[in-house]
Amino acid sequence: MPDNNVEIEAMQQAVAALGVYIGAVSNNIQKMKDAAVDCHDNMGKDVYSAKAIDQLNICITELTKTISKAEALKTTISNKIQEILDSTQGW
């Protein structure tokens, strides 16, 4: 039987790392949204600005999907940690 303490510690580190990742990417998404607004407001509606805004919006959409997946993984790992802790309580 594997050492549950080592397994739990590794999963807790993964949850913490995912939390940092989610926070950083979320921050970058907000910066990209702000950049799209600034581009629209300050650069006008020329072709290059429109293309830049479109690319920012594509990146925002893809990063938002990635964040959702990371949050789901974080939840799965957290649930597994709780499951292990619950199963060892009777020992």
Image (tube, grey):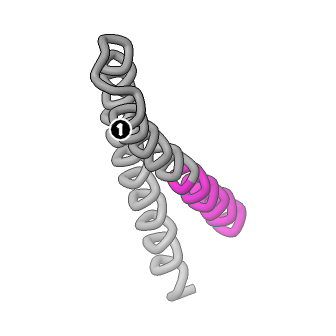
Left or right, 27 with respect to 37, comes to right
Counting from the top left corner in percent of width and height, residue 66 is at 39, 39
Q: Residue at x 28, y 22 (%)?
A: 45
> Residue 91 versus residue 6: which sits nearer the camera?
6
> Image height check: is 84 above or below 15?
below
Looking at numbered disc 1 in the image, what kind of residue is underneath it?
Answer: Asp
Q: Residue at x 31, y 16 (%)?
A: 46
Q: Residue furthest top?
A: 47
Q: Residue at x 54, y 56 (%)?
A: 23
| Residues packed near mark 1 inside 10 Å, few (<14), some (14 to 19) or many (20 plus) | few
Q: Which residues are magenta?
A: 1-23
Left or right, 7 with respect to 30, comes to right
Counting from the top left corner in percent of width and height, residue 55 is at 36, 21
Q: Which residue is mark 1?
A: 41
Counting from the top left corner in percent of width and height, residue 21 is at 57, 49
Q: Residue at x 34, y 48 (%)?
A: 68
> Image height check: is 84 above or below 13?
below
**The residue tagged with tag 1: helix, strand or loop?**
helix
Occupied quadrant, residue 5: bottom right
